[in-house]
Amino acid sequence: MLDSLVSLDPKGGVHPWLATSWEVSPDGKSYTFALRKDVTFSDGTPFDAEAVKANLDHVVDPKTKSELAAGLITPYKGTEVVDPHTVRITLSRPHSPLLSALSTPYLGIQSPATLKLGADALARKVVGSGPFVIDAFTPRQGITYHRNPKYAWPPQGAAHAGPAYLEKLEFKVLREDSVRVGALTSGQVDAIGSVPPVNVSQVKADSRLWLETRQAPGGNYNYYPNTQKGVFSDVRVRQAFRASIDFKTIIGKLYFGVFQPAASPIAPSTFGYDPGTEQLGGYDPQAASKLLDEAGWTTRDAQGYRTKDGRRLTVRWMFVKMIAREQRAVLSEQVQAEARKAGIDVQFLDVTPSNYAPIALRGDYDLSDYSWQRVDADALRDLFASSNIPNDQGGSGANASRYSNKDVDAWLDQTLDTTDPAKRVELYGKVQRKVVEDAAVFPVYTFNYVLGGAKKVHGITWEAQAYPSFYDAWVSAP
């Protein structure tokens, strides 16, 4: 549906798309883009500099409540329309991830006419300049698209030019794993996403099908301990919890090797990943016991849980079971059982999508969990910069660890100031090692997008965040 100003290749290279070229000021605070002149939105309105300004201003407007997208361009000051096909984006400070951020769907360009319709309308029908146009969207059921016959401006590197090959594209919501796999193997659908790990070998063995995986860059699926208050405010308790859980064995058995145990808060496919984290923070129940003793949790109650000053060592987990995917509920129960062996009582809070945010803002939890897919290691800034601790004053709110460290904040700030890849990698490495050493995060597993399809389906490609793209896709005759 949406096109972006620039595109990103799998190696992190930036290429023209709606913008044909760009220049960065010497101080890194302004980016001037030359725009294509032949692009129209699917509602017939032209794409131009005013459209870019309207979109970026809309994203950062507090009324839009687009914390995720706005968090990608936090230093944004404004956009100047230089002429109908030239825009200048001005920042309050250098922001080296800007181009990669502009490549993401979160900052894809919508028709300015639709931005005025309000949140409800935008949630149901997005109007862009992309190769497909929404026909109908039914919540919790699916969405259908038709081909944009006028499309002629794919990103650099696309396999063809002109309209998409597929006349129609339909997505169905099939939440039950068995139903989804059955729909693929019976030919009811042409492809499915999130092939369950237990069914991967089945799909691979079926001569009528193919299977592809792509490792998602950015934040792994991690557990985030509340370092600000509660039992995990003591680094020794955090380190003990991590050392008491055999994540490697649990992940290996539960996911059959489809997802890999994580060592860093970000995935190995992420620009800036530090392999040195793989030597830190492993399973060591004896070390866990010693750390808990040192932290004063030396006695046990009748149920075998550790206690101190008459209080049980309890971890309150803000786990939203009703929307958990990838068997995360099963995983959480196995982690709970492992923690019990160490004398730690893990309790699940009664959390729903509607009351999650108030609990997060109050910091009324000990443990949280989620993944944070992003195109590069700037995900670390979302996850660990003190400015992103959940609050009602701004920021991404993604720092569920409520972690605050002056060195980490300084290193993350320095990554924004430099465009030198080697320097950014060095700084991101320091951040990863520090947060792992401080047990400000418990890395769990690296997510792989697992796509299964019929042999007649061809040309599905992958964008930089490991989401499938259907512009070049086509279906052969039976």
Image: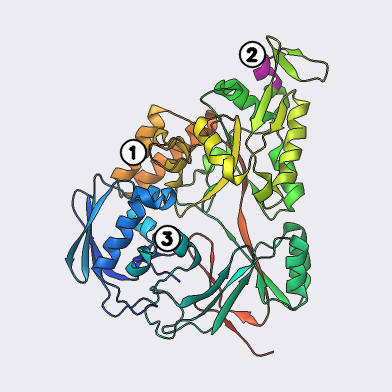
The amino acid beneath tag 3 is: Thr
Residue 52 lies left or right of residue 13; in this view the side is left
- Identify the residue under disc 2: 294
Q: CA distance from mark 2 to mark 1?
A: 35 Å
Dot 3: few (<14), some (14–19), or many (≥20) neighbours within 10 Å? many
Q: CA distance from mark 1 to mark 3?
A: 22 Å
The amino acid beneath tag 1 is: Asp
- Identify the residue under disc 3: 104
- Identify the residue under disc 1: 413
Q: Which residue is drawn at the image coordinates 70% and 61% (left, top)? A: 175
Q: Which residue is drawn at the image coordinates 22% and 71% (left, top)? A: 85
* Label 1: which secondary element: helix
Residue 446 lies left or right of residue 130; in this view the side is right
The image shows residue 375, relative to residue 295, as above or below, that is below
Q: Nearer the viewer, mark 2 or mark 3?
A: 3
- Residue 412's image quarter? top left
- Residue 171's image quarter? bottom right
Q: Is residue 455 visible?
A: yes
Position in image of residue 54 (x %, y %): 29, 62
